[in-house]
Image (cartoon, rainbow, N blue to C red):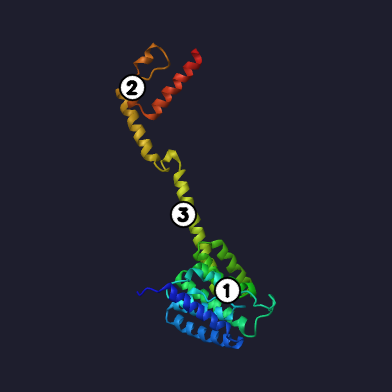
Amino acid sequence: MPQEDPKDVQMQLAGLTEVRMEMSLADRLEKAEETKAQANEHFGNGKWKVAMKGYVAAIWFLKRGNPKCPTMVASDHLGLEQVPTSLGAGTAATGEAADAPEPEGFLPLRITCHLNLAQSAIKMGEWNIAKVACEYVLSVDAANVKALFRIAKAQEGEGQPKSASASLTRLLKVEPNNADARKALEAIKKRSEKEKKAFAGVFSRAQGDNTKGDGLYTAAEESRDKAEEEVNAKTLPPMPQGPTKDSSMVTGDMLKHMTEKQREEFVRRINEDLDTYG
């Protein structure tokens, strides 16, 4: 793969930015339409990244003011991480009111480009790009069904099932008979329930009934302790009952061969007797 010269990329970006500044609104709208159509062809051929570049370029032509050209437009390898910050509404040009209406034809085309960009990003697993693209659409059309469905896909991809469920629920309020949204919502709920049951099973096994040996390690530990107790009952003398003169008869070797339960019991008895005689 040939290496790009960053200087060449920057020169091309500067050139594109300058050309855009000289274009009329009608020229920019026409160029955005042309670029979107080319991106649609690439999308149809499964070239998601090339299609994304086209949608980013089309959106750039439709933005307010004189924004810099996004790096991705002039590069085959750079600028993907910059895409989310390039999708805003743009800053009003000098002398233009910040709340001035979009030029005729700009907003519908921007919405289409953002939705198509989101779909390309979903195909690539670029969840944040898809989410930001949909957020713009929802900021101007809160009931946009495609934006709600695609942002739910992006949220689920980012591991946010609650947010995805909320977006799908909003969609179903707008379009109650949307079969795809209902199916996606049910799938998320089923996965969530399955995960809850799986984790519940782990904890129930870990805290199982010790009498039945259901807990983790319990059966093995009980079997080991019982075997040691049986052996020690035959080979070791009875444990001393307190700090009498016979206490010295308990040697280190004997303690070493006691089970943990026997050692605990021995210490407990000594402590009781120390309390008694103290």
Residue 267 quadrant: top left
Is residue 52 visible in the rendered image? The answer is no
Q: Secondary structure at mark 3?
A: helix
Question: What's the amino acid at mark 2?
Answer: Gly
Residue 177 quadrant: bottom right
Disc 1 vs disc 3: which is toward the camera? Answer: 1
Which is more toward the observer, 216 or 3? 3
Query: Relative to residue 200, is residue 21 drawn left or right?
Result: right
Question: What's the amino acid at mark 3?
Answer: Ala
Q: Position of residue 143 (x, y in %)?
A: 63, 74
Distance between mark 3 and mark 2 Cα atoms? 47 Å
Sequence-earlier tag: 3 or 2: 3
Question: What's the amino acid at mark 1?
Answer: Ala
Q: Secondary structure at mark 2?
A: helix
Considering only vertical position in the picture, is 249 above or below 130?
above
Which is more toward the observer, 151 or 178? 151
**Number of the label disc, if any, that sits on residue 252:** 2
Identify the residue at image location x=33%, y=30%.
228
Q: Which residue is mark 1?
A: 147
Considering only vertical position in the picture, is 233 above or below 51?
above
Q: Which quadrant, please, contains the N terminus?
A: bottom left
Identify the residue at image location x=46%, y=80%.
43
Q: Which residue is mark 3?
A: 198
Q: Secondary structure at mark 1?
A: helix
Instruction: Give neighbour class at mark 2: few <14, some 14-19, many 20+ (Cα, 10 Å).
Output: few
Residue closest to the far top:
245
Disc 3 vs disc 2: which is toward the camera? Answer: 2
Which is more toward the observer, 78 or 211? 78
Considering only vertical position in the picture, is 220 above or below 82?
above
Query: Relative to residue 47, is residue 84 drawn left or right?
Result: right
Q: Position of residue 250 (x, y in %)?
A: 35, 18
